[in-house]
Amino acid sequence: MATSVLSENGLRQCLRIAFGGSIGFLVTALFDLSYGVFFTVLPMLLLGLVPMINRQVARQILAASVMCGLEVGILAQILGGHSVLMTMVAFVLFLYRFAFMARGTAFLFGANGVLMLSIMLHYASYPGTDVNNLIASNFFASILAIAIAFVMHAIIPNKEHNAAPPPLPDKSPNRVRHEAILGATVTTLSFLVFQLFDLQDSISAQATTILVLFPMNWNGALTYARKRAAGTLIGVMFGLGVQLLLYGWYDILWLIVPLFWLGVMLFARIHVLEASGAGVGFGAMTTMGILFGQYLSPAQDLVYSGLYRLSSTFVAIIAAMMVCYLVHKLLNQFAGTRFGAA
């Protein structure tokens, strides 16, 4: 049952998310990093979705980053000018990651990998992209996120012991196949659309089409899509509010960081109170991370980026849900990929 009062552990998680995300954003701003979205959003993902950081979690995040780097490096060199072949190979790479997620054995490896691989493959397909810089940025952002998570848990530990993690889901083989093929198909079609229409500046919309698949089924995806849309709207409105408040001073770091921390803290509170994984609060929080980490610079303010992000995300959600429903219905026509019992 939802509550409006944070527990002691809930407050501490909010503080970890707010400080962790702010450190990532500060690193991005101080060093003027090309792919600041990785450095800003990854700590939020890790601190927001994982109750405790440990070696197993760290290994999955690092393994996902290394595999993405290897795959993107090889594909960009060999299939950089062959969109059809790259899309076919991308489907296979997405499929094995969604299979890990469906089984639950290495959900973080699959989830982080499929999200980053889609974004990195899209960026790597453009001739002007420095692929080595792209791969290095993702790798070092993963290391920084893990380091930030360990430090935050050491400085702001939970006061009460968390309950034991839930057991792995007991799914039939046909349901695992259904979830893996559904996720890989929608993600591949999303990648293909962003390639065909040359949507280089729509990282938020592209990420959304993948994040809505994380519930691993049609009903869960539909519920999350609504929450993601609401979270995107709230996150963009907060970013625009910061822009209007600071007006001509939005490039002054010591003014931006406290407001960024405040926004993340507020949305982290919503996220923790929802207790539903990636909900409205999580959507608003990651929206802020993308806006501030990738688009805020002295030469570009948040107004255009925020409004463009809002409209493109809504269109992406509607399109992804339509495709998700059609693929779900198609897979249910065959016993071997039926979502329910065979």
Image (cartoon, grey):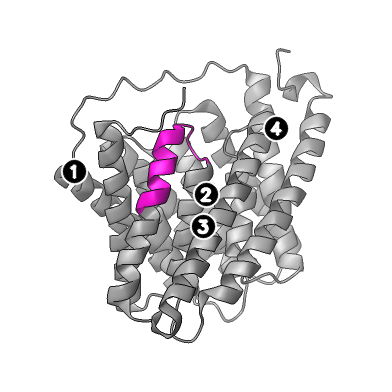
Camera-near label (2 vs 3) is 3
Given residues 116 and 295, the one toward you in this image is 295
Residue denoted by label 1 = 156
Residue 319 rendering spot, x and y as whole percentages: 76, 50
Residue kind at label 4, given as amino acid type: Trp
Task: Check the image and name the residue furthest to the top.
Answer: 341
Near mark 1 (Cα within 10 A), the count class, few <14, some 14-19 or many ≥20, is some
Residue denoted by label 4 = 218
Which label's residue is closer to the chain start, 3 or 1?
Answer: 1
Camera-near label (4 vs 3) is 3
Q: Is residue 272 magenta?
A: yes
Which label's residue is closer to the chain start, 4 or 3?
Answer: 4
Camera-near label (3 vs 1) is 3
Against 304, residue 72 (above or below) is above
Q: Are marks 3 and 1 in contact (CB under 8 Å)?
A: no
- Left or right placement of residue 157 versus residue 241 in this view: left
Residue 11 rendering spot, x and y as whole percentages: 28, 39
Q: Main secondary structure of the magenta part?
A: helix
Residue drawn where x is 37% and y is 63% of the image: 260
The mark found on residue 50 in the picture is none
Question: Quick check: can you spot residue 132?
Answer: no
Q: CA distance from mark 2 to mark 3?
A: 8 Å
Residue denoted by label 3 = 235
Q: CA distance from mark 4 to mark 3?
A: 25 Å
Residue 85 rendering spot, x and y as whole percentages: 72, 59
Given residues 242 and 341, the one toward you in this image is 242
SS category of the residue bearing label 1: loop
Residue kind at label 2, given as amino acid type: Gly
